[in-house]
Amino acid sequence: MAGRVQGKKAFITGGAQGLGEAIARMFARDGASVTVSDLNISKARDVAESINASGGKAFAYEHDVTDAARWEAVLQEAAADMGGLNILVNNAGIASAGSVETETLDGWKRVMDIDLDSVFLGCRFAMPVIRESGIPGSIVNISSIAGLIAAHNSAAYNAAKAGVWMLSKSVALHGARMTPQIRCNSVHPVFIDTPILDVFKKQIGEQAVHDKLSRQVPMGRIGEPDDVAYMVLYLASDEAKFVTGAEFKVDGGISAM
Ligand SMILES: NC(=O)c1ccc[n+]([C@@H]2O[C@H](COP(=O)([O-])OP(=O)(O)OC[C@H]3O[C@@H](n4cnc5c(N)ncnc54)[C@H](O)[C@@H]3O)[C@@H](O)[C@H]2O)c1
């Protein structure tokens, strides 16, 4: 049976662990060739090797998403490896805590650089490569529920993720005017159990983190990486061929309150 992204070629940033790894593995199981890019090349290679060992097709690249020149080169190299490019998942990102008074200007700029500017760079440099491949494309930007709902101690992260949300709509409207068309959507997860929570777990313990975060979610738990990966898989696939410029919450109901 053909997979849901059979024959597609996908580039996933921050694919060495967490959500990016789950997305890369799910895409590969559903028939896509995947390029796993990350700052952490050793873990990215482990993910790619394990996908290849289980019958998939994966490549790994060292890639800092804040580096504009590297973006251009790595997309060309990945497209050459995979025989084209038609999916980009801008997933790499960092968490950040700080209120408008405790956040520093340097901290603010770092979060903007990694969580927002990188998404602009990815969209900007992937569009011509996708167009050259000659088939419709899909860009999926991983924002956060924090891009739609604010917290008192999340000034930079809220602002960066809200930027990803609106940038995705502008990219979608631009991509809709192209031939072939390129869709773009944003995904907004609530707390998901990935290594991004490790700092917090070291501070108060794993169970305490689960309990504290789960209490905030109407469904009473935090998410699993595949809860998000299934949404990204849908948006990347042709099942979503009329879906663009939209935001998709994977949030256990938190934004319904
Ligand atoms: N896990 C959550 O609770 C959650 C919730 C909402 C949104 N998100 C978003 O999902 C995305 C993935 O988060 P995660 O939970 O998998 O995090 P994670 O920390 O487990 O993984 C992030 C990956 O991105 C890589 N990375 C970080 N900076 C990079 C850079 N400059 N260049 C290239 N790679 C870089 C890291 O090496 C790591 O492999 C992030 O954008 C995050 O903001 C996560």
Image (cartoon, grey):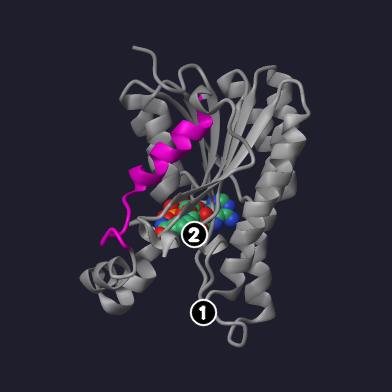
Direction bottom: furthest residue: 101
**Residue drawn 66% across the image and 58% down it:** 163
Q: Quadrant of residue 242?
A: top right
The residues bearing labels 2 and 1 have C-alpha atoms spaced at a distance of: 14 Å
> What is the magenta range?
218-237
Q: Name the residue beneath numbered marker 2.
A: 145
Whether residue 86 is situated above or below residue 208 in the rendered picture: above
Residue 17 visible in the snapshot: no
Q: Nearer the viewer, mark 2 or mark 1?
A: 2
User: Which residue is most to the left?
Assistant: 207
Q: Position of residue 77 (x, y in %)?
A: 64, 29
Vertical placement of residue 157 versus 248, above or below: below
Q: Residue at x 61, y 71 (%)?
A: 156
Q: Give the SS element for disc 2.
A: helix
30 lies above or below 247: above
**In the rendered structure, does residue 233 fall within the stretch colored magenta?**
yes
Is residue 23 shown in magenta? no
Residue for point 68% across, 45% down: 169
34 horizontally vs 107: left or right: left
Q: Is mark 2 within 8 Å of ligand 1?
A: yes
